[in-house]
Image (cartoon, grey):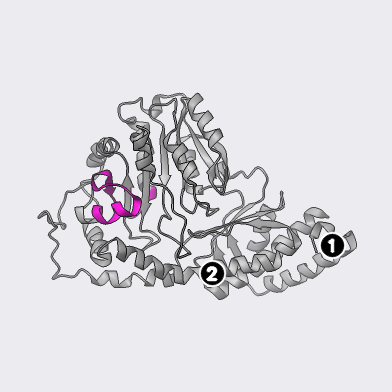
Amino acid sequence: MKLTDMNKTELVAMKKQWDDEYNSFKAKGLALNMARGKPAPEQLDLSMDMLDVLNSKSSLIGKTGEDYRNYGITDGIPEAKELFSKMIGVDTDEIVVCGNASLNIMYDVISTAFLKGIMGNTPWHKLEKIKFLCPVPGYDRHFAICENFGIEMINIPTSETGPDMDMVEKLVAEDESIKGIWCVPQYSNPTGYVYSDETVKRFAALKPKAADFRIFWDNAYCIHHLTDTPKMILNILEECKKCGNEDMVYIFGSTSKITFAGAGVAVFGSSKNNINSLLKVMGIRTIGYDKINQLRHVEYFKNYEGLLNHMNKHKDVILPKFNAVTEMLEKEIAPLEIGSWTNPQGGYFVSFDSLPGCAKRIVSLCKDAGVTLTGAGAAFPYGKDPEDKNIRIAPTYPSVDELKTAMEIFCLAVKIASAETIL
């Protein structure tokens, strides 16, 4: 029965039942964590063989004769550029292979824009105001970078096809202080949305007022599929080239959720102009990233097909967890009509929307019962969800059994908070 159709007596009785069930869980002293999209130990175990591909007898001389034990090759070893250029859809001279985290590259790119400017434009620190467009709900760490640099953030609503492009086009054409937009185009964090062909084409055809406007295309989940027939996005750099806008996009990716989260390889793709400009700064900041780790990844995967085969193993581990989340929500929440959620075909998250005004209460109830979630509002700039309804569910880290227990508690918290709101 729909919760809002219950009379007060029925609702009070149901809430008492749910409170009793909740208190039973609370008494167990559980400690379950769904706060971040971390790979599970079983996923990390998939890559343990990679530690054996190089040993003291391995040749560490590259295909061009470079000794990978030594300094040099700021833009990454050619073998790694060939492998990962296919992953993010760029040519080998349009990619830089870096250290273990794409977030480092994003931060460095914005830091460079503030200190030195972008390709001859005024350094951002000399400007009165810098603004970024932020599709919401979105990735909290993107927003944290902006907040750290004092960049003003503007919320952009999103749908299953991507950000509201009418709004994006209008704002960037009118306001020169808008210097960028954050995008997670394939299995967006946290909704799991995949940008439509039309959305990608409209991004590529943008006519920003600011000459140094950039699209920050964080393609973190480009091969993290949960189905054998995934929805694929158009190649943003190719579309930008068609429109004469090849300098307008920065593409990011990594193996953080493919091999080892703390010891992967991050990549940055863009036009040759952007690459050459940024390498001038990178060449001052570092003499080179970990080339042995780059070679280790290449020797392990061999080629792009090997990389994709490895991702099928990840799918086998985490798909049952996503299924457990959606099955519980369909069983416990759908009949009451007190929430909605995404059903992603890839990525790492499920985005849940409660009744307005309930998200913080739900997260608090879960915490008191031993289930840690990402903070309510985290998927919005400044941590402020205007309707207090969005919660990011991260199913990957717990075991299936732990996840089922956590979702039982989550669903009880949703019911209790919804009943309190209605009453």
Magenta highlight range: 81-103
Q: Residue at x 61, y 65 (%)?
A: 326
Sequence-earlier tag: 2 or 1: 1
- The reply to whether the magenta stretch includes residue 84 is yes
Label 1: element kind = helix
Circle 2: element type: helix
Name the kind of residue labelled 1 in the image. Leu
Query: Is residue 187 in the magenta section?
Result: no
- Give the x, y percent position of residue 135: 53, 42
Residues at circles 2 and 1 in contact by the CB criterion of under 8 Å: no
Q: Quadrant of the C terminus?
A: bottom right
Which residue is identified by label 1? 11
Of 323 and 241, which appears nearest the observer? 241
Residue drawn at (69%, 57%) of the image: 339
Residue behind mark 2: 321
Tell us which disc is closer to us: 2 or 1. Answer: 2
